[in-house]
């Protein structure tokens, strides 16, 4: 069985599992049009073509902004784990290779082809016809300019042309796709015996010497990082803006010149409550989630506030804001959710709505029709825009004066007050959190650690649209909390550590008893402890035990009815596991998804072949990367 799985893992069929979730990088993290810059500051060469540091930083910034819109909670550590900046550079190299190969093959993309591709995107259509105002509105919401989007579409068309010209099409069989489908969707039912650490905790009596030993060996666990309190003054267009000084005549003139910019698609203002359940979850899980949503709906029917119920019961990040989603334009969310949301009248709340994310309750707070904002509706927005434009013209002047005065020894607070700029305090913030707290680059934040208390940094720090002047008001060095302050936590950790050791030892004794030949009577000893899982998939999550990919992988490779030959660590202790049943996907499921899997398998093969072709092109064109990829992290 193990050898069969290994063979499958190398087959085209299994690769569809990954191919189905691969998003073509250029569509979501497009690098913008690469300039044919000079060779100075080059970080890579593709043949004779240089990729400069400036191009790379612009591409990284744009890719990061796109990625954050897709994944708002993504941290810098997450970016390092996926080698984000290395991916950006590789994509820029691949783009250059494709463009060079297209030129060699005499391929180009006409403006008509780009227009046709964009016009065919459903999100840009009204009544199945391309709507230019809707196009601009959707891009505006995505914070992407038409030029950037059209450049990405051009590159994608060009890449498709190169693929077709190279005749990289591949054949796929139904048998291959079905084998991959069966492999991916097969589920297991497992029996398990849990030996929880709490069962054995009373048997662990840590001594003072053991507490001291654990404390000394785990100082980092009890360390309070260095913290600093920073006073900051922003010199930005927004900080310098004075909307009250913008005249009504200027507002009216701007509106007349930019009226089309105030087009707005049909939209609804929503709150929602979400109870998550996977799109392919078992029917029992789907019904359980629906029942949970119905109970929340009953609370609303009894008069409870929607925002309060959302904070209490929603599993969406928006729960912290009472489920608030803001304005949702038509065509920007999943069909089932959108259909239900736009069918509501202001003040109405839906019955449970199923989407790929789970079950929703949707409340419509307001609606607006497609159209153009009136001057009155747009006035505050225009006034803010004009005020910021005026403020932008003063950034350099104000920054120079502020720097000159602070360098001459004037207090930052006094300078800020006289320049009508607010002073903001961060409060005591751990040094590693300063980057996020002030939206700084790590290298800029590092300058603050050496700044003395009471000192103002002698150079402004760049931030979005402007600069920050920074004074260190207070600092606390890193320190390890004394043992006496953390003694209870140390004792709990030592106790848990010892109890886990006892739990594993007891589990291994049990395994020797129940896995021995003819051990049926021994297994009866543990019948009160025996539990059975709900169906488990290859993702590695076991309800009640958590994520444990190693355990699940071993279970898939095990013989039916066999106890796995080790005790597996879980959050609460150690488990012994036996494979009870395999559940193959039904023929009806295959029939419903056949085309998706056939297409996914073909695309996975094409991607792999095209990647192999790009690898050959790299060798032929002598691609040189002049920086260590590790330094791009």
Image (tube, rainbow, N blue to C red):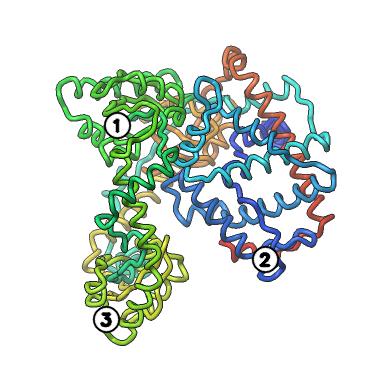
In screen coordinates, is 75 left or right of 30?
left
Q: Nearer the viewer, residue 488 or 411?
A: 411
Q: Nearer the viewer, residue 94 or 429?
A: 94
Residue at 72 percent across and 68 percent down: it is 39
What residue is disc 1 on? 271
Q: Residues within 10 Å of mark 2 (few under 14, many from 20)?
A: some
Q: Residue 29 at what x, y percent from top left? A: 58, 47
What residue is disc 2 on? 43
Q: What's the distance in space between the residues labelled 1 and 3, CA to CA?
A: 46 Å
Q: Which mark is residue 454?
A: 3
Disc 3 element? loop
Q: In this view, which residue lies farthest toward the bottom? A: 408
Residue 459, picture quadrant: bottom left
Q: Nearer the viewer, residue 327 or 369?
A: 369
Residue at 75 percent across and 47 percent down: it is 98
Q: Nearer the viewer, residue 272 or 162?
A: 162
Q: Is the residue 136 above or below the residue 412 in the image? A: above
Disc 2 element? strand
Q: Quadrant of the C terminus?
A: bottom right
Q: Are marks 3 and 2 in contact (CB under 8 Å)?
A: no
Q: Is the residue 35 above or below the residue 328 in the image? A: below
Q: What's the distance in space between the residues labelled 3 and 2, CA to CA?
A: 40 Å
Q: Is residue 525 visible?
A: no
Q: Is the residue 394 above or below the residue 533 in the image? A: below
Q: Residues within 10 Å of mark 1 (few under 14, many from 20)?
A: many
Comes first in the chain, label 3 or label 2: 2
Disc 1 element? strand
Q: Is the residue 369 above or below the residue 453 in the image? A: above
In screen coordinates, is 281 left or right of 369?
right
Comes first in the chain, label 1 or label 2: 2
């Amino acid at each position: 069985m193990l050898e069969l799985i290994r063979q499958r893992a190398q087959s085209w069929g299994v690769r569809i599992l990954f191919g189905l979730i691969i998003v073509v990088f250029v569509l979501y993290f497009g690098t913008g049009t690469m300039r044919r810059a000079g060779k100075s500051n080059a970080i890579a060469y593709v043949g004779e073509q240089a990729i400069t540091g400036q191009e790379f930083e612009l591409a990284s910034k744009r890719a990061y902004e796109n990625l954050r819109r897709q994944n708002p909670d993504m941290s810098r550590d997450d970016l390092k784990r996926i080698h984000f900046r290395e991916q950006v550079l590789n994509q820029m190299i691949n783009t250059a290779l494709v463009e060079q190969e297209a030129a060699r093959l005499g391929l180009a993309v006409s403006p008509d082809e780009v227009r046709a591709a964009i016009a065919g995107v459903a999100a840009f259509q009204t009544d199945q016809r391309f709507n230019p105002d809707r196009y601009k509105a959707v891009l505006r919401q995505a914070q992407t300019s038409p030029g950037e989007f059209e450049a990405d579409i051009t590159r994608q068309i060009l890449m498709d042309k190169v693929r077709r010209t190279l005749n990289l099409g591949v054949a796929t069989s139904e048998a291959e796709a079905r084998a991959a489908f069966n492999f991916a969707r097969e589920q297991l039912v497992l029996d398990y015996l849990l030996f929880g650490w709490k069962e054995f905790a009373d048997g662990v009596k840590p001594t003072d010497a053991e507490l001291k030993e654990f404390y000394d060996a785990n100082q980092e666990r009890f360390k309070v990082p260095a913290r600093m309190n920073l006073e900051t003054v922003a010199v930005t267009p927004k900080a310098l803006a004075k909307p009250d000084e913008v005249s009504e005549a200027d507002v009216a003139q701007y509106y007349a010149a930019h009226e089309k910019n105030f087009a707005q698609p049909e939209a609804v203002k929503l709150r929602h409550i979400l109870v998550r359940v996977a799109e392919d979850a078992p029917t029992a899980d789907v019904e359980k989630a629906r029942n949970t949503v119905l109970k929340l709906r009953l609370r609303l029917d009894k008069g409870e506030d929607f925002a309060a119920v959302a904070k209490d019961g929603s599993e969406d990040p928006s729960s912290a804001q009472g489920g608030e989603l803001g304005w949702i334009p038509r065509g920007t969310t999943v069909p089932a959710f959108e259909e239900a949301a736009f069918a509501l009248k202001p003040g109405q709340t839906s019955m449970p709505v199923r989407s790929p994310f789970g079950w929703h309750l949707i409340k419509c707070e307001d609606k607006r029709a497609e159209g153009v904002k009136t001057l009155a509706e747009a006035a505050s927005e225009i006034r803010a825009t004009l005020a910021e434009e005026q403020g932008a013209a003063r950034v350099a002047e104000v920054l120079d004066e502020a720097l000159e005065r602070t360098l001459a020894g004037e207090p930052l607070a006094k300078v800020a007050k006289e320049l009508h700029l607010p002073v903001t305090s961060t409060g005591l913030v751990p040094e590693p959190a300063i980057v996020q707290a002030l939206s700084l680059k790590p290298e800029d934040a590092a300058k603050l650690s050496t700044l003395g208390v009471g000192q103002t940094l002698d150079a402004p720090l760049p931030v979005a649209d402007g600069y920050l002047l920074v004074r260190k008001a207070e600092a606390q060095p890193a320190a390890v909390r004394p043992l006496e302050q953390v003694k209870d936590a140390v004792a709990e950790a030592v106790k848990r550590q010892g109890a886990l050791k006892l739990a594993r030892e007891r589990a291994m004794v049990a395994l020797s008893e129940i896995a021995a030949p003819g051990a049926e009577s021994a297994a009866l000893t543990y019948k009160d402890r025996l539990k059975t899982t709900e169906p488990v998939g290859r993702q590695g999550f076991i309800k009640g035990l958590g994520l444990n990919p190693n355990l699940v992988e071993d279970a898939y490779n095990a013989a039916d009815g066999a106890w796995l030959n080790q005790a597996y660590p879980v959050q609460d202790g150690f488990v012994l596991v036996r494979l009870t049943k395999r559940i193959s996907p039904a023929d009806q499921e295959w029939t419903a998804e056949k085309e998706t899997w056939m297409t996914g398998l073909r695309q996975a093969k094409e991607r792999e072949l095209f990647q192999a072709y790009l690898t050959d092109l790299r060798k032929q064109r002598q691609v040189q990367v002049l920086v260590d990829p590790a330094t791009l992290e």
